[in-house]
């Protein structure tokens, strides 16, 4: 009788120890991550140096207090890629980073590492999707464009003022004269949109105040 | 054994109820600071029609308030004091103390009066800047509908062309360190908050709707 009870006791004690250990891990995990958000990092080439606000990090998941973070990836022979992330409490955001090859060596390295190249392409696809989602949520008017009217037309495209920022999309208004431009702005307002919230470029409009001052 | 279990259950339930009561009735500190002489009241917001807010006034005060409020949503409503515009400001009391420093925009009467003293400085600053532009022959403009905005540190106006075939343009100036500077350079048909994030959206909206 004593011989069968002892193993049961040992099993029970072991179970309690395991449960307590699991609980302590859970509690520690909860305490460490409480009030924080998480940045998941997807980077290719995978051996890139990744920094958050200038500090080198290791691991693809970073638990951080709410705030704004610049996540940057760098690798020799590649142009750095950075993303600014606004992190809130209990939020999970993903930074997609794919430094661009800027040397023949880097290009050759990618060719000889097809898995890395495939990962770069996948990250590129995700970045494009994020940009598109951003554009459509920040510029809802785009869903109604293009529009053609008798005296004016509206379309959209990359802003000429910010040619390197894919998130800066301009509403392009084409009109014959000042009256047409005003009608186009009126049309935007009539659709329930505020022109102040958009970058508006007027094709065919000469702004006499643009030019070299003092000439 | 049964009695012990029953007592244990009752105790757990009591703890849960006490915890819930503490949670819903706990309060946090709040301090509010307004412009001198401004009167305001704090109203509890309960997802009811706004016209019934007057019945739920929590506190009325003058210039500053310091006290405790239970968790929930509130609205701070200031009265029109002659110098300042009346405003409503929503805030939430959660698990942390709240500190609010409210700066109300000046009333239109105050801004109009202030403009009389600032107009000459604004004109001089704009004309100095204007003279740096080399406008093509035939392009000349007059400043119209100029007005001070917010707390008098912003000025917005139209540039109306002498030739009505041309576009009316808009600009915003800001008073910094006692000097008026053209913020939206160059003037344009419409001023974008994307290009000028440093200019309050209300200021741009007002100037774009002149």
Image (cartoon, coloured by chain):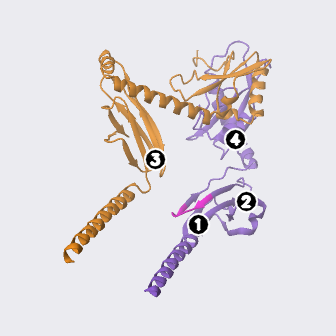
Chain colours: A orange, B purple
- Chain letter of disc 1? B
Residue where numbered disc 3 is placed: A67
Q: CA distance from mark 2 to mark 3?
A: 35 Å
Q: Confirm whether the magenta stretch covers residue B93.
A: yes
Q: Which mark is residue A50?
A: none
User: Of tags 4 and 1, which is closer to the observer?
Assistant: 1
The residue singled out by tag 4 in the image is B148
Q: Using the rendered image, report if marks 3 and 1 lie on a common chain.
A: no
Tell me if residue A53 comes above or below residue B79 in the rendering: above
- Do marks 1 and 2 share a chain? yes
Residue A92's spot in the image, x, y percent?
Answer: 46, 46
Q: Helix, strand, or loop for circle 2? A: loop
2 or 4: tag closer to the N-terminus: 2
Rendered location of residue B80, percent (x, y): 74, 57
* Above or below B191: residue B31: below
Nearest to N terminus: mark 4 or mark 1: 1
Q: Chain of mark 3?
A: A
- To which residue does mark 1 refer? B71
What span is in magenta? Answer: B91-98
């Amino acid at each position: 009788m004593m011989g069968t009870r002892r193993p049961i006791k040992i099993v029970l004690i072991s179970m309690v120890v395991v449960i307590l250990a699991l609980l302590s891990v859970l509690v520690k995990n909860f305490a460490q991550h409480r009030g924080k958000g998480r940045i998941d990092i997807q980077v290719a080439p995978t051996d890139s140096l990744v920094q958050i606000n200038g500090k080198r990090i290791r691991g693809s998941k970073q638990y951080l207090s709410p705030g704004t973070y610049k996540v940057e990836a760098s690798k020799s022979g590649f142009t750095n890629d950075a993303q600014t992330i606004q992190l809130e409490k209990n939020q999970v955001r993903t930074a997609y980073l794919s430094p661009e090859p800027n040397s023949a060596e880097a290009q050759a390295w990618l060719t000889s590492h097809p898995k890395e190249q495939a990962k770069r392409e996948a990250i590129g696809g995700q970045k494009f999707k994020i940009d598109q989602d951003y554009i459509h949520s920040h510029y809802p008017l785009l869903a109604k464009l293009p529009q053609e009217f008798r005296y004016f037309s509206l379309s959209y495209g990359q802003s000429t003022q910010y040619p390197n920022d894919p998130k800066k999309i301009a509403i392009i208004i084409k009109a014959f004269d000042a009256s047409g431009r005003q009608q186009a702005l009126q049309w935007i307002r009539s659709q329930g949109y505020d022109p102040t919230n958009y970058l508006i470029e007027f094709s065919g409009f000469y702004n006499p105040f643009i030019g070299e001052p003092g000439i | 054994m049964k009695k012990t279990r029953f007592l244990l259950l009752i105790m757990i339930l009591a703890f849960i109820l006490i915890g819930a009561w503490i949670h819903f009735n706990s309060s946090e500190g709040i301090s509010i600071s307004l412009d001198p002489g401004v009167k305001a009241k704090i109203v509890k917001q309960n997802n009811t029609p706004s016209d019934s807010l007057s019945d739920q006034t929590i506190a009325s005060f003058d210039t500053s308030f310091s006290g405790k409020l239970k968790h929930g949503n509130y609205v701070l409503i200031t009265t029109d004091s002659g110098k300042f515009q009346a405003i409503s400001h929503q805030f939430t009391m959660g698990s942390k103390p709240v500190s609010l420093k409210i700066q109300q925009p000046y009333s239109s009467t105050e801004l109009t009066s202030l403009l009389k003293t600032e107009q000459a400085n604004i004109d001089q600053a704009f004309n100095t800047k204007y003279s740096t532009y080399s406008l093509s022959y035939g392009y000349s403009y007059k400043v119209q509908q100029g007005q001070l905005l917010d707390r008098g540190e912003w000025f917005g106006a139209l540039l109306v062309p002498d030739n009505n075939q041309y576009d009316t343009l808009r600009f915003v100036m800001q008073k910094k360190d006692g000097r008026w500077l053209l913020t939206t350079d160059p003037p344009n048909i419409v001023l974008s908050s994307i290009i000028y994030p440093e200019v309050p959206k209300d200021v741009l909206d007002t100037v774009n709707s002149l």
